[in-house]
Image (cartoon, helix red, strand yellow):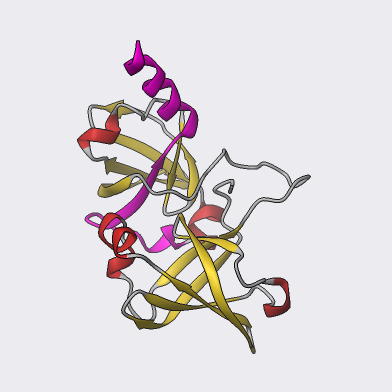
Amino acid sequence: MFTGIVTALGAVTRRENGRFSIASVYPAASIEIGASIACDGCCLTVTTVTADAQGSIFTVDVSEETLRRTTLGEWREGTRVNLERSLTLGQEMGGHMVAGHVDGVARILAVTPEGVSQRFEIEAPETLARYIASKGSVALDGTSLTVNDVSGPVFTVNLIPHSLAVTTWGQKRAGDRLNLEVDLIARYVARLMDVR
């Protein structure tokens, strides 16, 4: 379980088929083999970890299913990645409940300055649009965000300068694809409504 509060930026240092090595500032001694780390919103299992001058390099194995259904298939050496360690009991819940199970891929339609923040207009897959509500929560590339407005499959979110600086969002442009996880509660409420 995660909160969608990005705690570090990582970078892909190597890719071999479905195995990725990611450099991070997390101390190597603090990462256990088998630990879960959300990488751009995907809950991945650490398979190896080594110390690095800046912190650590850990590896994750990614299934073909995940490569097909997320943006991870587009990762290359140098790709910057939002990282979050799994939630522990007693930790502050700053974002919202995020499972790290990506539901689909969304696309940025436009980026517009709005005061000190940036407004992102995003298109969700039609099948997921029903789970997105104004003032509800979504996780995009592992970042917990509040939805501003919704019109069909298109919705908007705003990011403040701090969020733009400490995540990969500062580099996002129109046309970029994003890992989308809809709100867990919305998904289950919709499922219960379908059962009736």
Looking at the image, can residue 135 be seen? Answer: no
Q: Quadrant of residue 62?
A: bottom left
Relative to 28, is 108 above or below?
above
- Let me know if residue 172 is in the magenta part: yes
Q: Quadrant of the C terminus?
A: top left
In the image, 33: left or right of 38?
right
In the image, 3: left or right of 168?
right
Q: Quadrant of residue 54?
A: bottom right
* Count of labels in the image: 0
Identity of the residue furthest to the top in this view: 196
Query: Residue 121, how many percent across, how many down?
Result: 29, 42
Relative to 68, is 127 above or below?
above
Identity of the residue furthest to the right in this view: 90
Query: Residue 176, how many percent across, how many down?
Result: 27, 58
Q: Residue at x 73, y 78 (%)?
A: 29
Stretch of the chain drawn in magenta? 168-196
Q: Residue at x 25, y 49 (%)?
A: 107
Relative to 47, is 166 above or below?
above
Looking at the image, can residue 121 be seen? Answer: yes
Q: Residue at x 54, y 48 (%)?
A: 4
Please tell me which residue lies in front, 11 or 108: 11
Please tell me which residue lies in front, 100 or 161: 100
Query: Residue 57, how many percent across, how many down?
Result: 56, 81
Q: Residue at x 31, y 60 (%)?
A: 71
- Let me know if residue 83 is in the magenta part: no
Query: Residue 7, how many percent across, how many down?
Result: 61, 60
Relative to 17, is 186 above or below?
above
Q: Quadrant of residue 90?
A: top right
